[in-house]
Every structure is written in C-alpha cells, then in structure tokens.
Image (cartoon, grey):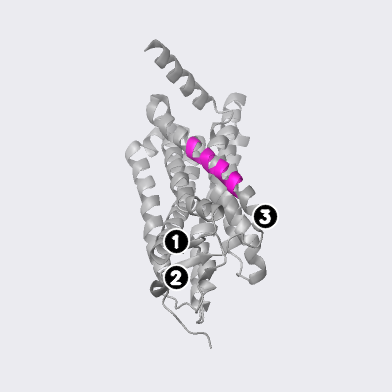
Amino acid sequence: MVENFNASWEGYFIFLGFSKWPHLEVVLFVVILIFYMMTLMGNLFIIILSHLDSHLHTPMYFFLSNLSALDLCYTTSSVPQLLFNLWGPKKTISYAGCMLQLYFVLALGTTECVLLVVMSYDRYVAVCKPLHYSVLMNPRFCQLLAAASWVCGFTTSALHSSFTFWVPLCGHRKVDHFFCEVPALLQLSCVDIHANEMTLMVMSAIFVVIPLILILSSYAAIAWTVLEMQSTTRLQKVFGTCGAHLTVVSLFFIPIMCIYLQPSTKSSQDHAKFIALFYTVVTPSLNPLIYTLRNKDVRGAIKRLSRYKREK
C-alpha cells in the first residue's frame, strides 16, 4: 500500500523532464537558451518601440505590447528553471516554487487566450467598422479590455491551481515533466482524480475552445468583408495584419489543445513534453518575428527613431 504524504513536508519535487534522453540535454540547453534570448530581445524590442514611437500608439500595438509582456512573463515562469535543470544533475523544485510556477503558468496562459480574442475583435472592428473604429476602440476601452484579460487569467488560475494542490499525493515526488503543469501533477495523486480531470476539461473548453471559436468567427466576418473590398492596397494591408495574428493564434492554440483536450496517459506524456516545449519556448520567440517581419509600421518607426538619434 502506497503511503500518502503531504508534499510540503518533503519540501520539493523532482522533474524527470528529458532524463530518458540524457544525450539530448546539452543540445536542448543550447537550443532553448538561444530561443529564450530571442524571446527576451524580440518582445522587449516591441514593447520599447511601441512606447517610444507615437505613430504606434494605436489599439493594435497597445494589445501587441501586452502580448509581448505576456510572452516575456510566460516563458520566464518556466524556462530559467528548465535551463538550470538541464545544465546540472539537480532537477528539483521546491513545493512553494512549484505552486508559484503552476499559478503563473496557468494565469499567463489563460490571459493570453483571452487577449488573443481581444486582438481579433480589434481587427474585426478595424476592417468591418472602419468609420467607427476610433470611437469603439478608444484608449479607455482598450485599457479596460487589456485589464480584463489579465484579471480574468489571474483570478481563474488562483481557483484552478488551488484545486490542483488540494489533491493528496502519493509517496513519490517525481513529476514526469520539465515544469509544474496540471496533467503531470495529477498523475502523482493517490485518490480518484476524475473530478479534477473533468474540471480541467471544462476549464480548457471555456478558455481554449470558446476563445478559438470567437477568434475564428471574427476572422470569418473579416474574410467576408475583405472579399467585398475594391482597394488592392487596403486588401494587402488587411491580409498582412490579420495573417500575422492568425499565425500566432495557430501556434498558440493548436499545441495547447493537443495537451489539455485529450486524456492524459503514460504513453502520451513524452509527446506532451515536446509539445509543451514548443508553446513555452518556441512560440514566444516567433511572435515578435511574425508581427514585425515585413511590417511597414515597424520599419517606419525604426527609421524615425534612427533619424531622431542622428539629428540629436
């Protein structure tokens, strides 16, 4: 009979991570470090540029700055710990550290789901109701939408992470993942976790499936409006901005759905680690490139700032 224990007595968890493939750990360390540095530089670049250039003081770049701040925080909530574990033999995290990591991962991930819906609504109003755009998307309303996204994410996470850590754990502390995530922690339980799994499915439906439906609905309306456009220049601009957002949505939602909308099994856990590695490490580093590559507004802002520095 496995003896139950309170994880806080033991004080730490052990991450199994990628220990099945020790020959990959050095390679993963280098690759993840490069992507992490790209994430830091790319997202800081967007935040600073959007703040400094007055031409970018628009709803689209305000929300994009929020997304960049989210990506910075989201990736920093798990990647430094992962790099530390890959570099040395010690692959542990304290009980309190695991609670905090789970809370922030859930909070920031949920916030991003909601924020992507807000960004799709912004594009919908810009394309489908251009004459009313400045009235509908006024600065105060944009700030309220952004604040609501953050509050929704952090409030939901407080409930969900508390519910996860109330579950009694079995007599081992080995987490078969590289960070504290709900499905991996639930596998440590020594009681029936059917209620927790159902809660996870419901929360995933609310904050993954419903936002995705709203985003796709917005872009269906945008596509219908675009088909009626006569201006080739405006058509290209719409495809540029909306295409970038849809790419970011795909990179974020598809991996999340692969993990949270299917039953967790032992055989799928290894696949889940690499999928999680993609949306925690790769996606945040690609978002700045997707939004700035071939973006005339960003190129114009860089030129204006460079000219200002030379004149000064």
Q: Position of residue 255 (x, y in %)?
A: 60, 55
Measure how far apart labels 1 and 3 are at the Cα level. Answer: 28 Å
State the image quarter where residue 267 is shown.
bottom right
State the image quarter where residue 241 is shown.
top right
Residue 216 in sight here: no
Cβ atoms at labels 2 and 1 below 8 Å apart: yes
Residue 185 left/right relative to 266 = left
Q: Sort mark 2 into few (<14), some (14-19) or many (20+) by Cα contacts within 10 Å.
A: many
Q: Is residue 249 magenta?
A: no
Give the residue at mark 1. Answer: 102
| Disc number for residue 115 | none
Q: Secondary structure at mark 2?
A: helix
Residue 30 left/right relative to 297 = right
Q: Position of residue 17 (x, y in %)?
A: 58, 61
Task: Give the residue type at disc 2.
Answer: Thr
Dot placed on the residue nearer the N-terminal end, 2 or 1: 1
Q: Is residue 36 magenta?
A: yes
Dot placed on the residue nearer the N-terminal end, 3 or 2: 3
Task: Give the residue type at disc 3.
Answer: His
Give the residue at mark 3. Answer: 23
Depth order, front residue of 121/47: 47
Q: Main secondary structure of the magenta part?
A: helix
Q: Position of residue 159 (x, y in %)?
A: 39, 66
Q: Which residues make up the magenta segment? A: 29-41
Report the residue at 56% width, 35% height from top: 289
Report the residue at 47% width, 67% height from top: 13
Q: Sort mark 1 into few (<14), some (14-19) or many (20+) by Cα contacts within 10 Å.
A: many
| Disc number for residue 164 | 2
Report the residue at 63% width, 36% height from top: 227
Q: Sort mark 3 into few (<14), some (14-19) or many (20+) by Cα contacts within 10 Å.
A: few
